[in-house]
Structures are given as structure tokens and as C-alpha cells.
Amino acid sequence: MPEKELTLRDHLEELRKRVLFIAIAILIGTVVAFIFRDRILAILIEPGFSQLPDTKPIFTEVTEMVAVTMKASLMLGVIFALPVIVYQVIAFIGPGLTKKEKIYLFILLPFTLLIFGLGVAFGYFVLFPPAFQFLFTFGDNVATPAVRIGSYMNVVTSLLFWMGLIFEIPLVMFILARMGAVTSRFLSRFRRYALILAFVLGAIITPTLDPINQTLVAAPIVILYEFGILLAKFGQKLRSGNKKLMIEAE
């Protein structure tokens, strides 16, 4: 039997339910993160303040520590809720997709989460130590660093978010090639501009002005772009193979 066509009201009601499930998942994740807030804040503070032994960040406003704690808890809550968010998004757009497209989504989206996590890990373990070493020791013979926790957390969360997104580059290139929006040849020709953009992004993302930390961001972007070209070739082959099957079926 053909599926019943949904009205606009049905779609809005479905969307409301999906958003409600996502909100509940984020709320539960945020509460769990808040319960373990001291441990979470200690983990986020570690890469920066390991450069300043026996030193803690300060807060200068009455509500600053509460705001920082809630922001960190909410960020972790969203991360904890990602599997639910992904499932609800697929469930909502699922009726408009073909069977093959649904299979691709279910295969690719877990990899998206994993790759995002790898980007976050790279930022935390590789980028943070030298970046904060530079920031906290630059001019320390003139002034003593007294870092506000609000300012520090803004830098940390921003860097972690951008590094997670940057690591998605190869997957995005694969999807675009699979859809036929780009080709591996076009991406190869764009390589020289990608190199320039990598260093521009490195300058924008890193809070420091030194070329070493900017290179620590730019180098992975270049490597990920080259890997993305290989994935784009694979995506093209999959697209070509599907076209051949369709022609033979006709």
C-alpha cells in the first residue's frame, strides 16, 4: 500500500515531536554533565594551566563561575545527546529519501560523530599545549598572568568546536563528489588555493599570532584536504557505478 501523504500540519507536528525528543536528550545530558561539573572543568582547564603549576584561573564577576559551569555543562549535554539528535534528524527526513540514501546516511553519520571527536582530541592533546604555552609565557617577565576562567573557557570551547568541524572536510568532499557537485579533478586543481585557505583558517582559529601554532592548525587541514581528494575519487566511482546499473536496468 502507498504511504499516506502528510499534510503541512502533520509535518509540523512531526517536527515538534522530534525537537521535543532532542530537547529532552540535551536536558538529560546537561544534567549529567552538571553533576560531574568539577571533573569536566578540571579536564578543560588541564591543557592550559598545566603550563602554570599551582595556578588556578580566576573569576572577577559574581555570576561568572556559574555561567561558565552552565556553558560547559550545556556543551557536554549536546555532545552526549548527539546519537539521539542524529537519529531524530534521520527519522524526520527519512520519508523523503530513497532506500539507498537512507543506507548512506546511517553509514556516514556515525563516522561524522567519530571524526568530529578526533578533531576535538587533536585540538585538546596537540594544539592546546603549545598554544597556551605561548600565550601564558609571552611577556611573563613583565606581567604576571591572571587568567579569567570565562575568557579561557571561551577560547577552549571555540577551538574544540572548530577543530571538530575541520576534521569533517574529507567527509564533506566525499559527499559532494558522491552527489556529483564536485569532481576529484576540480578539487586537485583547487589545491593551491586550499593551501592558502588552510593558513588563513589557521590564523583565524588560533588565538595566537605565532606561525608555529598557526601551522599546527593549517597542516592537518592540508592533509585532510588531500585525503578528501582520495575520498572524492571513491565517491565518483560509486556514482558512476550506480549510473551504469540504472542504464542496464533500463
Image (tube, rainbow, N blue to C red):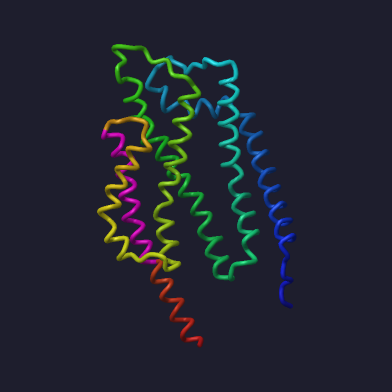
| 42 in the magenta segment | no
In-image side of 172 versus 62 (left or right): left
**Residue under the point 64% across and 41% down:** 26
In-image side of 173 versus 212 (left or right): right
- Give the total number of marks visible in the rendering: 0
Image location of residue 79, percent across then percent down: 56, 42
Q: Is residue 116 above or below residue 134?
A: below
Q: Which residue is more in the foreground, 170 or 110? A: 170
Q: Is residue 229 above or below residue 121?
A: below
Q: Is residue 179 above or below residue 211?
A: below
Which quadrant of the figure has residue 174?
bottom left
**Residue under the point 32% across and 37% down:** 203
In-image side of 98 versus 121 (left or right): right
Question: Which quarter of the rendering shows the N terminus?
Answer: bottom right
Magenta region: which residues? Answer: 211-234
In-image side of 96 versus 125 (left or right): right
**Residue under the point 38% across and 15% down:** 145
Q: Is residue 115 above or below residue 244?
A: above
Q: Residue furthest front?
A: 8
The chief SS type of the magenta part is: helix
Image location of residue 33, percent across then percent down: 61, 33
Image location of residue 43, percent across then percent down: 49, 29
Which quadrant of the figure has residue 106?
bottom right
**Residue under the point 38% across and 32% down:** 128
